[in-house]
Amino acid sequence: MKTLFSEAQILVKVEELGKIISNDYRDKEILLLGVLKGSFLFFADLARSINGNIQVQFIQAESYGSSAQSSGHVKLNFNKNIVIQGKHIIIVEDIIDTGLTLHKIIETIQAESPLSLSVCTLLIKKNKINSIDFKLYHGFEIEDYFVVGYGLDFNEQYRCLRDIKILEN
Ligand code: 5GP
């Protein structure tokens, strides 16, 4: 598989994102809400690159099942005991493709009355940024590849690769 981003490139980008977020949320307490499972490595690195007062929570979303195509159906597993109300929430995603997963998550979180809501995604597929109507931090914009590694899987494989690679058929 061809490497799209090396571990070193990823870590530089994550540090950059951490610095921007630290600056934007200076003196504010943040609740980082990770979207499992794909964001787990990005989440861990991002959380450690933000300088500030952070709490962490997780939500689980599934849309692809065992295929490389979005199924169009998003299943969310959100623990209602997580307190969102009155907090500055940053949703941490691995990748935005159709945006369907994120919209469902945003709808769910907005209904809980956060003080503010933004999204930080490591990857976004090209031409998707224009349709974004929420505050977005993003790492890399990529072509319409199916990528794996650094948390991203194909059929539960490749999640623990250090680099991000293009899955070839
Ligand atoms: P969306 O709802 O934006 O189409 O898809 C979002 C979710 O689908 C992501 O959180 C991720 O789990 C999965 N996904 C989308 N594109 C890719 C990709 O290129 N590779 C992998 N491994 N998962 C993807």
Image (tube, grey):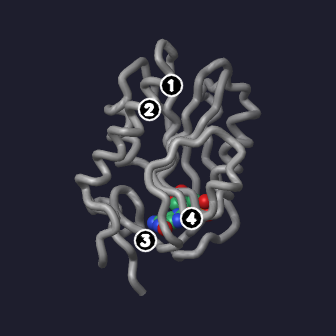
- Number of residues whose C-alpha sits closer than 10 Å to that of mark 1, classed few (under 14), some (14–19) or many (20 or more): few
Kindly identify the residue that appears in the image at 41 percent across and 61 percent down: 152
The residue identified by callout 4 is 126
Q: Quadrant of residue 88?
A: top right
Mark 2 vs mark 1, CA separation in Å: 6 Å
Instruction: Kindly tell me whether residue 38 is visible in this rendering.
Output: no
Q: Do the residues labelled 2 and 1 touch (CB within 8 Å)?
A: yes
Which amino acid does the dot numbered 1 rest on? Asp
The residue identified by callout 3 is 154
The residue identified by callout 1 is 24
The residue identified by callout 2 is 20
Which of pointers 4 and 1 lies earlier in the amino acid sequence?
Answer: 1
Which of pointers 3 and 4 lies earlier in the amino acid sequence?
Answer: 4
Secondary structure under tag 4 reads: loop
Mark 4 vs mark 2, CA separation in Å: 22 Å
Which amino acid does the dot numbered 3 rest on? Phe
Secondary structure under tag 2 reads: helix
Q: Are marks 3 and 2 in contact (CB under 8 Å)?
A: no
Kindly identify the residue that appears in the image at 61 percent across and 28 percent down: 81
Would the CB of label 3 be found within 8 Å of ligand 1?
yes
Mark 1 vs mark 3, CA separation in Å: 34 Å
Instruction: Name the one closer to the observer, 4 or 153.
Output: 4
